């Protein structure tokens, strides 16, 4: 009886240990500065004028809820279609205020940003970027941008 109980406890212990280690993940060490730099990377890709360089910032499974369109963009092609038109406006973004939160292999950056357009106009908007570490790089998993509802 004691040996059966002992074997059962050992088997359960090994099973739980194996399950725990299979589920554990290594968290990438990061900083607010690194996460803030992801907007700079995205903004720099806008400056290239190449929609494929912008879309490369997004995870394969991600959503873009853009400022100047009512259509959610889920696929790379849908994002590309949006950025073809947006990049024609020659946008240059800047952060007006932000809050960054970091977790294990994920982060979000939310706040207010502005885009100076090539025609001299400015778009002010609220934004949220969520990011996921894919083992090699940080990619955008969701990007929501909406124009400010009140005129200053």
Image (tube, rainbow, N blue to C red):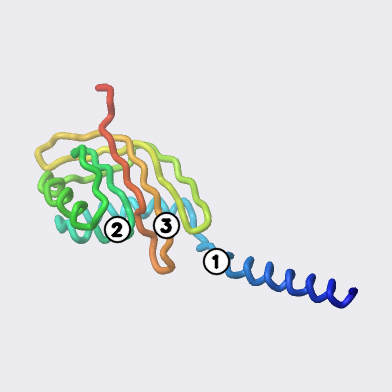
Q: Position of residue 55 (x, y in %)?
A: 24, 57
Residue 92: mark: none
CB atoms at circles 3 and 2 under 8 Å apart?
no
In the rendered image, residue 11, in percent from the top left (x then y), is placed at 74, 74
Q: Badge 1: few (under 14), some or many (20 or more) residues near its Cα, within 10 Å?
A: few
Relative to residue 126, is residue 52 drawn left or right? left
| 13 versus 42 height, above or below | below
Q: Vertically, is 113 above or below 40?
A: above
Nearest to N terminus: mark 3 or mark 2: 2
Foreground: 8 or 24? 8
Tell which circle, 2 or 1, labels the residue nearer the N-terminal end.
1
Crowd band around label 3 with a 10 angstrom C-alpha radius: few (<14), some (14–19), many (20+): some
The image quarter containing residue 124 is top left
- Residue pictured at 37% horizontal, 54% vertical: 37
Give the residue displayed 33% in from the left and 51% down from the top: 39
Extreme residue toward the right, this view: 2
Spot occupied by residue 18 in the image (x, y as percentages of width and height): 64, 72
Residue behind mark 3: 132
Q: Earlier in the sequence, mark 1 or mark 3?
A: 1
Query: Disc 1 on helix, strand or loop?
Result: loop
Marker disc for residue 26: 1
**Distance CA(mark 3)–CA(mark 2):** 11 Å
* Circle on res. 57: 2
Residue at (62, 68) in percent of width and height: 19
Position of the N terminus by quadrant? bottom right
């Amino acid at each position: 009886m004691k040996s059966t109980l002992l074997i059962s406890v050992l088997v359960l212990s090994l099973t739980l240990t194996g399950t725990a280690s299979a589920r554990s993940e290594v968290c990438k060490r990061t900083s607010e500065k690194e996460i803030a730099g992801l907007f700079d990377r995205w903004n720099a890709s806008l400056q290239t004028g190449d929609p494929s360089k912008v879309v490369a910032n997004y995870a394969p499974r991600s959503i873009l809820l853009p400022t100047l369109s009512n259509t959610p963009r889920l696929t790379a092609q849908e994002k590309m279609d949006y950025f073809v038109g947006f990049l024609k406006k020659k946008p240059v973004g800047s952060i007006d205020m932000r809050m960054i939160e970091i977790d294990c292999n994920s982060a979000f950056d939310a706040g207010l940003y502005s885009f100076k357009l090539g025609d001299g106009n400015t778009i002010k908007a609220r934004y949220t970027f969520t990011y996921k570490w894919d083992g090699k790089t940080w990619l955008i998993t969701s990007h929501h941008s909406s124009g400010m509802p009140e005129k200053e």
